[in-house]
Image: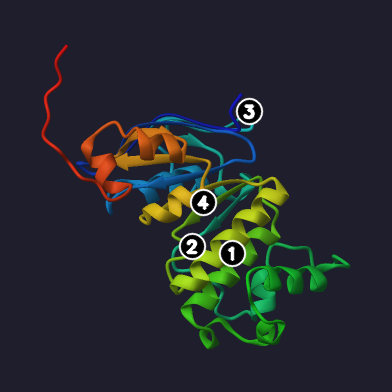
Amino acid sequence: MSFLELRNLHKHYGPVAALAGVDLNVASGSRTAIVGPSGCGKTTLLRLIAGFEAPDQGRIVLDGQVLANGGAAVPAHRRGIGVVAQDGALFPHLTISDNIGFGMGRDDDKRAERIVELAYIVGLDKAILKRRPHELSGGQQQRVALARAMAMKPRLMLLDEPFSALDTGLRASMRKAVAELLEAAGITTILVTHDQAEALSFASQVAVMRDGKFSQVGTPRELYLKPKDRMIAEFLGDAIILPASVSG
């Protein structure tokens, strides 16, 4: 049985079909990357899973619990899902320490120790924990957002372009560190990205999205070596297209 099941998800914004029948199975503890061109519906899908919006049609089931069925949906705060948005979405009036520990109990004896540990994991010096978000760079703010989401120990983590504000070197090391942390914690993860290399290196399952639905879903190796069509082949790496005919 899949940990997360998406069945025939549809979402319209007026006449525009953002999602046009999405099906996906996600195994417990796995990492899935959703990749595709801008405007194909990646972020809309994450918003439906998180509970920020309800699907017009279809079902979302997480660990046996029905989160959404058509217009009926469980509120976002009751889903136990961590979300890291593209812009970080930190609380500007709180210190970095309070941002990271926002979802943790104030009476937790190890709260301060856990905050320092999470800051270290995402590559932040504990000296900045007393600062405010506006005193940090964009890359530092994104790392704080990652630490805040991981502090809540969610059963499912949704990452929407979480490494986009980081420089190339830091991006690779952060991606590896986050993958190892989530795997060690047993947290099932869905990553949305437009970076093909990131998707192929981060995930155990890759779903290529186009026009509001998945064109192909499989392991990174399967998609890279056996793409279903030319678009997928060209999107996932350098391709040389040769005209040919098959006979016999």
Q: Which residue is depicted at the point 71% across and 50% down? A: 184
Q: Which quadrant is home to the C terminus? A: top left
Left or right: residue 133 versus residue 200 is: right
Residue 175 occupies which quadrant of the picture? bottom right
Closer to the camera, 30 or 78?
Answer: 30
Mark 4 or mark 1, which is nearer the start of the sequence?
A: 1
Mark 3 or mark 1, which is nearer the start of the sequence?
A: 3
Per the image, label 1 sits on a secondary structure element best described as: helix
* Amino acid type, callout 2: Pro
User: How many C-alpha atoms fall within 10 Å of the one at disc 3: few (<14), some, or many (≥20)?
Assistant: few
Query: What colour-coding does the image apply?
Result: rainbow
Mark 3 or mark 2, which is nearer the start of the sequence?
A: 3
Q: Which quadrant is home to the N terminus? A: top right
Location of mark 1 (residue): 146
Numbered mark located on residue 202 in the image:
4
Per the image, label 4 sits on a secondary structure element best described as: helix
Whole-angstrom CA distance, mark 3 to mark 4, is 26 Å
Mark 4 or mark 2, which is nearer the start of the sequence?
A: 2
